[in-house]
Amino acid sequence: MDIILEAKGLRKEYQDKLALKGLNLEIGAGEIFCLLGQNGAGKSTTINLFLGFIKPTSGAAYINGIEVAENVTKIKESLAYIPENVMLYPNLTGLENLALFSSLAGFDYSKEELMHYLLNAGLPAEAISRRVGGYSKGMRQKVGIAIAVAKHAKVLLLDEPTSGLDPKASNEFSELLMQLSGAGTAIFMATHDIFRSKEMGTRVGIMREGELVDVLPAADLEANELEKLYLNYMHI
Ligand SMILES: Nc1ncnc2c1ncn2[C@@H]1O[C@H](COP(=O)(O)OP(=O)(O)OP(=O)(O)O)[C@@H](O)[C@H]1O
């Protein structure tokens, strides 16, 4: 399996806080790695290091074998990021947002192609030409997925993408992620959703106080076992 995301001794110290204590991790093409952990465990710090938003204190993050901190512009070509609230231009339509973000990534699509990406990501046809300012959170997530697919991202990083989505929207979102992983995208997602992690993750990592304390193949566990395990770790 091709290793797409890699952390080697990845460590981040803020002024007075050791947020990540030397993470070692490899994530392959087509994997969905779900990272669980309490508030403050270090999940967003890990994602921000992979995105190149912050620099590690020591160690390194790699995407496709390229060191992130030294090649922030280069690695952006192969990754897409979906935070809890996908940042789009509210005064532009879904179609215009997708056209803009895919052209920034170097792709010049026809209107038909753009519509195809949006429809495939599950955006209702009537929404495509509406301003994004009026979209629901789930609809913005779908535009985020359409952007990821349109720019042929090899890596998708997500930070609590399903929090605040209703069960139907959350379910549709999980299905889209599973389709993307089926097409070979490596997916790394910080989440509080134990049930979905079990359902769609290939592996689930548990992070506690800046350390990855366990990594489990999701298929081996029942959701309630995973919850028990998670809670046990949190109470050590
Ligand atoms: N810019 C910063 N300056 C100082 N400390 C920070 C900074 N960003 C994060 N931290 C601290 O680092 C630790 C890890 O934070 P991080 O945001 O990575 O956790 P998290 O697991 O993503 O939490 P949540 O589930 O709440 O998003 C926390 O103690 C946090 O207070």
Image (cartoon, rainbow, N blue to C red):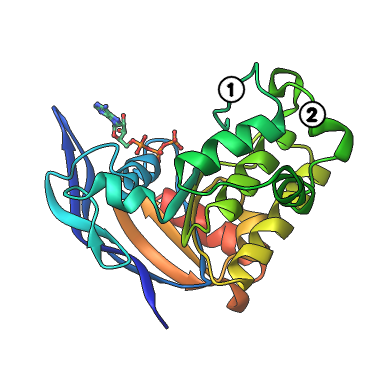
Q: Alpha-carbon distance for marks 1 and 2?
A: 13 Å
Identity of the amino acid at label 1? Tyr
Q: Which numbered marker is on residue 89?
A: 1
Q: Residue furthest left?
A: 58
Q: Is residue 90 above or below residue 54?
A: above
Is residue 21 shown left or right of residue 212? left
Quarter holding residue 209: top left
Disc 1 crowd rating (10 Å Cα; few below 14, some 14-19, many 20+) is some
Q: Which numbered marker is on residue 20?
A: none
Is residue 169 shown left or right of residue 188? right
Please report the residue visible at 39 percent of the width from the left and 45 percent of the height from the top: 43
Which residue lies under the disc numbered 2? 129
Q: Is there a contact, CB below 8 Å, between mark 1 and mark 2? A: no
Quarter holding residue 165: top right
Identity of the amino acid at label 2? Ser
x and y, in percent, of residue 68 in the image: 24, 52
Is residue 182 shown left or right of residue 8? right
Please report the residue visible at 34 percent of the width from the left and 45 percent of the height from the top: 51
155, 215: nearer the viewer:
155
The quadrant in which the N terminus is found is bottom left
Is residue 95 shown left or right of residue 128? left
x and y, in percent, of residue 5 in the image: 35, 64
x and y, in percent, of residue 49 in the image: 28, 45
Quarter holding residue 97: top right
Label 2 residue SS: loop
